[in-house]
Amino acid sequence: MSQSQVPRTIRALLVCCLSATAIRSVPAKEFLTEQEIKKIQDAPDVDKRVQVYLEAAALRLKTVEARLYGRESAPGDPLEFFSIEEMLEGYYRILRSVMFNVDEAFQKPAAAGAKLGDALKHVKDSTEKGSKELQVLKKIVEEKKNEEAWNLIQKALEITEGARDGAETGLARFPQKSKPKR
């Protein structure tokens, strides 16, 4: 390598490094709305927090289906400016957050107590329903030939199945406490 090529190579490496740093420093779009974040922050117990997350996940699937059928969000809808793909990615990230919350509570079962069984029951029930909804969405995007949405649905199905399996395993260890009948 000649001496004139060395500075050029160093400059090219420097530009690549700076570009990579700039790309990584762009924050990902928030996957929860401000109201959802507030509800999660206000939920002190794992079962309540998980329930808020799962309601947010269900809302995304419902909204994706509506959009796939051509219905747009009403003005002021908190998901109005999210694309189908962003909502599917949001669903995935929400379930990942649920899994982190449950895992954290699982690490401290004495602190979580009976609330952990309730949280696991919420996860099991929601993921069973979510899995069915995702299968319906998968058929719709196949008909519409939306490959990006199809790939995101596949990713969502995988995490949904994993969360459901984990909830079933956890329920065997921490069964939900039955509530007294009134």
Image (cartoon, grey):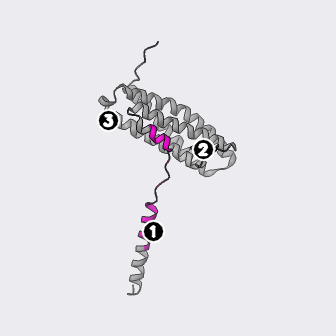
Label disc, if present, on residue 76 of the rendered structure: 2
Range of the magenta residues? 15-39
> Is 22 left, or right, of 104 in this rendering?
right
Q: Main secondary structure of the magenta part?
A: helix
Sequence order check, earlier mark of 2 and 3: 2
> Is 157 left, or right, of 104 in this rendering?
right
Residue 142 is covered by the magenta coloring: no
Cα separation between marks 2 and 3 = 40 Å
Q: Nearer the viewer, residue 17 or 41?
A: 41
Residue position marked by numbered label 3 in the rendering: 107
Q: Amino acid at mark 2?
A: Gly
Q: Amino acid at mark 1?
A: Ser
Q: Nearer the viewer, residue 42 or 132?
A: 42
Q: Nearer the viewer, residue 74 or 180?
A: 74
Identify which residue is drawn at 35% across, 33% down: 106
Identify which residue is drawn at 46% across, 59% down: 26
Can residue 52 be seen in the rendering of this structure? yes
Q: Nearer the viewer, mark 2 or mark 3?
A: 2
Residue position marked by numbered label 1 in the rendering: 19
Image position, residue 118 (x, y; %) = 42, 27
Image position, residue 105 (x, y; %) = 35, 34
Q: Is residue 68 above or below residue 171?
A: below
Residue 31 is covered by the magenta coloring: yes
Q: State which quadrant residue 12 falls in.
A: bottom left
Cα separation between marks 1 and 3 = 40 Å
Assess whether mark 3 and mark 1 are in contact (beta carbons under 8 angstroms): no
